Amino acid sequence: MTLVAGMDVGGTSSRALVADLSGKVVGTGLAGGGNPISRGVGPAMAAIRSALEQALEGVDRSLVRGNVIGAAGFGSETGAHEALRQVWHEMGLPGGPVLIGDIDVAFASGTPEPDGSVLISGTGAIAAEFLGGRAGRVADGLGWLLGDHGSGFWIGRAAVRHACAPVATPGDPLAEAVAQQLTGRAEVDRQAVVGAAYAVEPVRISELARVVVECAEAGSPAAAAILESAADELVTTLGQVRDEGDTSIVVLGGGMLGTARLRSLVEERIAGRWPGAPVTRCGSGVGGAAWLAARNLGEELPPDLHATLTGATSTT
């Protein structure tokens, strides 16, 4: 039996999956965040190891012939690469860990195709092209201070700006909803809203994106306009890594593009700008990593293996 291991390592959780080449899952694991920058190298390695140990319980580790670990935060200056190799050695796993970017796993989770683009909008926002299975041009992903246009943070900040506008919009619930979220009171006190916004960690402004989506669904013109603008920003970012006339697949991911309204707005713009390009959503990231590990073996694989591991079965 040949087994492969996949991992999807983020700032809040680390997931592991071990499967055979038919797609049968023999073990899974879940632990805390494994980003060595946000968590620290020691805690990150402990989380990664815990998730792997769970997935490998009762498994003959000598059968694990391939692996892929999708993660962010493994810059050379952190010492995390060496620490991960040490974990791998201590666990008695064959070879060494194959580390790739989390955006590579995101693309692979949505499609088995080697060429295409991925667009992600969660707390942050990023787009990348893929050629022959490898990432090429990358746009945005610069964080809340320098970029992340169309992200949850960007949407949340736009909502705060709306709440602080000099002229209120009669009958529109967005400003009051933002004030309620930030200050605990529906009354819009400009100074109180600004003070509350600056009192929290910048990344937490992204939590207001949920308020914008809810208000848009409730009929807020201001919230709807913010989401329209976010869609414009996201497709502009995608256009930086995707040439006109490109008909390769586009994979959409991230929590914001998991909301029906924003996803629909983005899909409409993609259809208008790149007619004929199929659009799909990210599937299981850990399944995408396992699929990449299987593909890297160079063996003939079942045609449904990607869909089996990732759950990504349809495109539009």
Image (cartoon, rainbow, N blue to C red):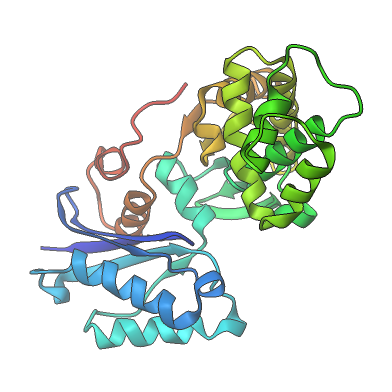
User: What residue is shown at x 19% (from left), y 63% (from top)?
Assistant: 3
Residue depicted at x 45% and y 41%: 113
* Picture residue at 37% right of the left edge, 50% below the top: 288
Query: Residue 95 location in percent, x, y?
Result: 30, 80
Residue 303 horizontal/vertical position (percent): 26, 39
Left or right: 48 as drawn, with respect to 234 = left
- Left-right relation of 72 to 24: right
Q: Is residue 256 above or below residue 128?
A: above
> Which part of the image, by quadrant, shows the N terminus?
bottom left
Quadrant assignment, res 83? bottom left
User: Residue 24, position in %: x, y?
Assistant: 15, 49
Q: Residue at x 62, y 21 (%)?
A: 215
| Image quadrant assignment for residue 247 | top right
Vertical arrangement, residue 133 with respect to residue 18, above or below: above
Q: Nearer the viewer, residue 247 or 236?
A: 236
Q: Position of residue 209 (x, y in %)?
A: 62, 36
**232 or 101, nearer to the observer:** 232
Q: Report the front residue among 85 and 198.
A: 198
Q: Quadrant of residue 199?
A: bottom right
Residue 260 visible (yes or no): yes
Direction right: furthest residue: 166
Q: Nearer the viewer, residue 292 or 164?
A: 164
Visible in this render: residue 238? no
- The number of numbered discs placed on residues in the rendered structure image is 0
